[in-house]
Image (cartoon, helix red, strand yellow):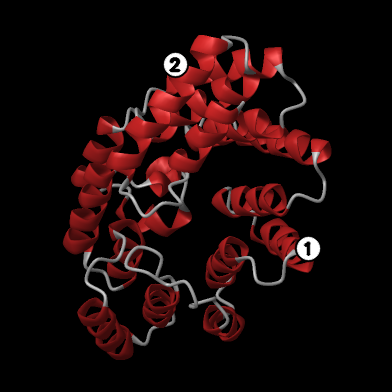
Amino acid sequence: MAYAGLADLYTFNQKGLKQTEAIPIAKDYVNKALSLDSTLGEALSTLGLIQSVYDYDWAKSKSTLEKAIRLNPNFPFAHIYYGNLLQYTGESTVKGINEIKKALSLDPVSVSLNWVLGRNYWLARQYDLAYGQIKKTLTLSPNYKLAKGTLALVLLGKKNYPEAFKVISELDTTETSTSSDWQDPYHCYALALSGDITNANYELNKTLLKNPGQRSFILSRIYIALHDYDKALNRLEQAYKDRDITLYFLNVDPTFDPIRNEPRFKALLKKMNLN
C-alpha cells in the first residue's frame, strides 16, 4: 500500500516535476507494489490510470481497471478512473458518469470525488447539472481550486460572463508557480470568449512576459477563443510532448469544439489512440 501511495503522489505530480519525469517514477513504484501483491486493487487502479493518461493504451487500461474493480469493488478511485475512460474515449458517457456516481456513493463527502462528478457533467455539456454539482463541492471546501476553475468554465459555457469573471477573480494565487498559474490564463480566456479581444491579447502578452513557462494545454484554450488556431494547435502538440495529464479529456472537452475538424487536431487524437 505504501508503494501504491507513492505511485499516486508521482502520478498527480505534487513535487514540481514534469509529467515525463514523474510518471516513470510512478510506474516504478506501482510495479514494486504489484510485485509484492499482484491483487492490490489500489495499485492496479493507479496502473490503469497511467495506461490512460500517459501511455494512451485505452484497451489495456480498461482491462486493468476492470480487474481492479473486481478485486476491490469498494475502492472509489477504481470507479473514477474507469468512468473517466468510458466517457473520455467516447464509449459511453452515461455508463461513465454512473461509475463516477458509484465512486461518490462509496465516499459521499470526498471533495475531489464531488468535483470529478461536476467536471464530468461539464465535459458532457450538461452545464446545469455541472453548475449544481460544483456549487455543492464548494460548500464542502469553499477554496477548492479545481472546483473553482471548473465552475468558471461551466459559467463561460453558459455565457454567464459576469459570474465567471467573479469566480476567476477568486482563484487562489498564493501557491502560483510556473505551471500552476490559472487566474491569469482563465482571465484571458474569459475576456476572449466574451468578445473583448483587445484586452484579451493585452493580458495574454502580459502574462506570458511574467510567466513564460505556463502550461501549454491551458494556453491553447485562449488561442482558440482568439481564433488563432495554429497557435492553439502548436500549444496542444507541446502539451502532448509534455504528456500533460489534462490531455486525458481532449476528446470530449467542449473548449476544443472549434478546432475538431482541423487536420492537426485529428492527427493529435490519432497519436493518442482516440481517433
Residue 233: % across, % down: 22, 54
Under mark 1, the amino acid is: Leu
Dot 2: few (<14), some (14–19), or many (≥20) neighbours within 10 Å? some
Residue under numbered circle 2: 60
- Asked where in the image residue 136 lies, by quadrant, the reply is bottom right
Under mark 2, the amino acid is: Lys
Residue under numbered circle 1: 140
| Quarter placement of the C terminus | top left
Q: Are marks 1 and 2 in contact (CB under 8 Å)?
A: no
Residue at the (49%, 11%) spot, across then down: 35
Which residue is nearer to you in this view: 212 or 152? 212
Task: Report how far apart the C-alphas of labels 1 and 2 lie in the structure.
Answer: 35 Å
Residue at the (59%, 71%) spot, across then down: 155
Label number found at residue 202: none
Dot 1: few (<14), some (14–19), or many (≥20) neighbours within 10 Å? some
Give the side of residue 104 with respect to residue 258, left or right. right
Examine the rendered structure and indicate whether residue 156 appears above or below residue 3: below
| Quarter placement of the N terminus | top right
| Number of disc labels | 2
Q: Nearer the viewer, mark 1 or mark 2?
A: 1
Residue at the (63%, 35%) spot, across then down: 80
Give the side of residue 99 with respect to residue 26, left or right. right
